[in-house]
Image (cartoon, helix red, strand yellow):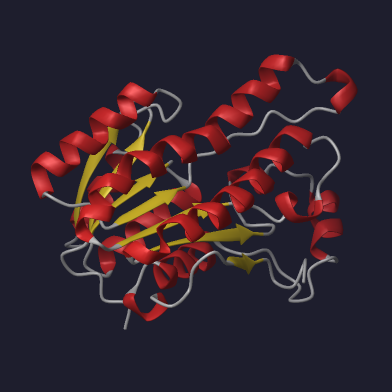
Amino acid sequence: MFDLADKVAIVTGASRGIGRDIATVLAARGAHVVAAARGEHAVDTVAAIHANGGKAEAASVDVTDRSAVDAMIAATLERHNRIDIMVNNAGITRDQLLLRMKQDDWDQVIATNLTAAFVCAQAVLKPMVKQRQGRIVSISSVVGQVGNAGQANYAASKAGLIGFSKALAREVASRNITVNIVAPGLIDTDMTRALAGKAQGDWTTQIPLGRLGTTMDVASAVCFLVSDEASYITGQVLAVNGGMYM
């Protein structure tokens, strides 16, 4: 199951956390992974994949720079002649109550979390349409479904990903391209570990399964959605939140 042999996958934000595990899981299933991140930050991800016998290469790219994204897509096509999977994972937070939020904090979050997904999806559509096959998955958040005080910019970007993906799914379904969303809940990452113990405990009480999710929980959901087993699923939000939001 979930055989991705000979598939070419691009994963943005692949240097750590959820993105790193997505890249690792796809490679373990046979995909050749282009691990994209700013600077040289994805090198460690690629090294770990190689150490486990997988195929991967690093791409230094700022996803808010359209020319850099276009160059990454062109280079991938030149080397591999196809792109089968696009995972839009890159994301940032700039948390602040709206009364105090700076315009730049809004603009940066929207540019990185939402506009970059539009740019990346648009860039891969031409080869996917030509192939008459493709998988696009974007990483949203439970915050985009229920909101969260102090995260108006983040919630807007993640909710926007859901609407964007549903619209795109309708546009490209006839070309055998599926477009889906994974919406994680509270996941055990560097960011959540930084929460004070009591605050993390308070959040956990809102999760019926009684624990934080893992990055592998999210990566496994992505792996399913990009596989042949999910070929009849498009325009859907797969919530990986332990029941936090139903």
The image shows residue 156 at horizontal and vertical percentages of 71, 39
**Can residue 14 be seen in the rendering of this structure?**
no
Please state which of residues 89 and 138 is positioned toward the viewer in this rendering.
138
The reply, left or right, for residue 83 in relation to residue 2 is left
> Does the image show residue 10?
yes
Residue 46, how many percent across, how many down? 25, 46
Horizontally, is 156 left or right of 3 in the view?
Answer: right
Q: Name the residue located 84 percent from the left edge and 65 percent from the top edge.
A: 206
Residue at left offset 9%, top offset 43%: 79
Residue 19: x %, y % from top left = 44, 49
Q: Is residue 161 left or right of residue 101?
A: left
- Name the residue rendered at 40%, 44% in the picture: 121
Q: Is residue 160 above or below residue 40?
A: below
Residue that lies at the very extreme toward the bottom in this rendered image? 1
Query: Where does residue 227 sit, x and y in percent of width and height?
Result: 35, 72
Closer-to-camera residue (13/172): 172
